[in-house]
Amino acid sequence: MKRESIVATIWLFIAGYTAYASYQLGLGAGGRPGAGFFPFGAALGIGLIALLRLIGANRDASEAKPATRPEEWRKIFAMVTGMLAFALLLDSLGFAICTFLLLAFYLKIIAAQPWQRSLIFASATAVGAHLFFDLLLRAQLPRGLLAFLT
């Protein structure tokens, strides 16, 4: 069994256990998510990704190659830096602005998309995430610079 298959299988088991434990906590009802709602959703996402990786690992005969070129390491560093900046600036700038900046940064620097496409997609995603979490789920997210809108 290939290394990637083993890792994907382990993640599949972790996702299954997490989904079960989250379901035991309660998923909630309607507009009131329970304590297990977000971990359950995350477990489903992890399980889906692990399942897709497991299927792909069994189809693909070639082994994945580690990052060796300088531009690959630059992208890895940019990803970690973006996540760290998001975490550090979340309270002061707010969820919507941090989400916009993170996605615009990722799309421009890592995915090498044009500025216009990066800014449009980042704006749409930040607005969509705000609508979903703030208005639909009524989650209390940091507002930061946009606190005057409440």
Image (spheres, grey):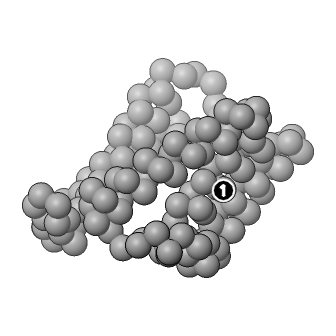
Q: Residue 60's x, y, as percent?
A: 54, 22
Q: Quadrant of the C terminus?
A: bottom left
In this view, the residue in front, 3 or 8, is: 8
Q: Residue 79's x, y, as percent?
A: 70, 54
Q: Residue 146's x, y, as percent?
A: 54, 70
Q: Residue 144's x, y, as percent?
A: 55, 75
Residue visible at 66% across and 56% down? 101
Farthest residue in the right direction? 70
In this view, the residue in front, 111 or 129, is: 129
Residue visible at 64% across and 55% down? 102
**Which residue was labeled with disc 1?**
101
Q: Secondary structure at mark 1?
A: helix
Residue visible at 76% across and 32% down? 114
Q: Is residue 72 left or right of residue 21?
A: right
Q: Is the residue marked by circle 1 packed among few (<14), some (14-19), or many (20+) residues within 10 Å?
A: many
The amino acid sitting under disc 1 is Leu
Q: Is residue 40 left or right of residue 46?
A: left
Q: Which picture quadrant has residue 78?
A: bottom right
Q: In this rendering, does residue 12 appear at all?
A: no
In this view, the residue in front, 109 or 118, is: 118
Q: Is residue 139 left or right of residue 148?
A: left
Question: What count of labels does the image hold?
Answer: 1
Q: Which picture quadrant has residue 97?
A: bottom right
Residue visible at 27% across and 61% down? 137
Q: In this rendering, does residue 117 appear at all?
A: yes
Q: Is residue 30 left or right of residue 57?
A: left
In this view, the residue in front, 89 or 145, is: 145
